Image: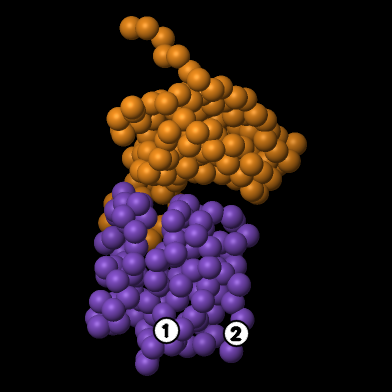
Amino acid sequence: MATHRRIKVNQSGQVTVVTFNDSKIIDEQEIQEFGQELYDLVEREDRKKIILNFGNVEFLSSAALGKLIGFDKRVKQHGAELMLSNIRPEIYEVFAITKLTKLFEIKDDEADALAAI
Amino acid sequence: MPEHVWIWTAQATLPSRRGAHMPCMQEILETLESLGWEGRDLFAVEMALEESLTNAIRHGNRLDESKRVHVECRASRDRFWLRVKDEGNGFRPQLVPDCTADENLECPGGRGLALIKAYMTNVEYNECGNCVTLEKIRSTPTN
């Protein structure tokens, strides 16, 4: 099992649920690490259904959004599915301003995402 | 119209190194908190600080450590003002692709500028584009 510094990974049946260790995703080094750990889920571990639970996340920068977009591309390239959940209103607004609500499938909470994915 | 009375002003010069803006940003946020800023207003300022300062370091000065980022900040209980100037060649904000257009949703960049514009009350660039001036008028009523 891979070790992760920036994310926590749990398996719920066929679905991989990821939570974030950092409440603020700003630092560029940390963003690189969290991006690589996400990429590994599909590229090395071949996981096919992934939920990113943003419950812990209080702030994220545009650099972090760029990394999430890169992850979404890799998910699609590998024929996997991605959903986002538990996004607090301030963070949802960041997705809405940048229209990433059109790119990502977002559910209110993890249970909704597990039921839909 | 009377000139605004600022409670706190500060200036800083930052090296063009990844993360060099963090202590400055933290000090400004803590000052605003002490002035009663909270919630969405504080989040908005944090976003504008993060995006404008990293833009100056990374895109303006291209992480060239011989170049500096000059920061000027003013704050009061209901207003925040920031000027960030880098020593790069500048850019033309109007030429940055609209990251919210359907065809650009998957592009990696351009979101920082959109976020600054959305969260700040006023955003102005100088002619050559290496200096941005931001202002936020607090939406939460002050007591």
Q: What x and y, as percent, mark residue A67?
A: 48, 63
Identify the colour of chain A in the image: purple
The answer to which of B109 and A101 lies nearer the viewer is A101
Q: Secondary structure at mark 2?
A: loop
| Image-quadrant location for residue A107 | bottom left
Q: What x and y, as percent, mark residue A73?
A: 41, 71
Q: Earlier in the sequence, mark 1 or mark 2?
A: 2
Judge whether residue A9 can be spotted in this image: yes
Q: Which residue is mark 1?
A: A16
Image height check: is B93 above or below B47?
Answer: above
The answer to which of B9 and A74 lies nearer the viewer is B9
Chain where mark 2 sits: A
Residue type at mark 1? Thr
Identify the colour of chain B in the image: orange
Q: Is residue A61 left or right of residue A90?
A: right
* Same subunit: marks 1 and 2: yes
Q: What x and y, as percent, mark residue A93?
A: 31, 51
Q: What x and y, as percent, mark residue B72?
A: 57, 25
Spatial CA distance of label 1 from label 2 is 13 Å
Image quadrant in which the C terminus of chain B is located: top left
The answer to which of B43 and B33 lies nearer the viewer is B33
Chain where mark 1 sits: A
| Image-quadrant location for residue B42 | top left
Residue at 64% x, 48% y: name it: B19
Q: Secondary structure at mark 1?
A: strand
> Neighbour class for label 1 at 10 Å: few (<14), some, many (≥20)?
some
Image height check: is A47 above or below B124?
Answer: below
Q: Report if the CB atoms under discs 1 and 2 are less than 8 Å apart.
A: no
User: Disc number at residue A105?
Assistant: none
Q: Which residue is mark 2?
A: A2
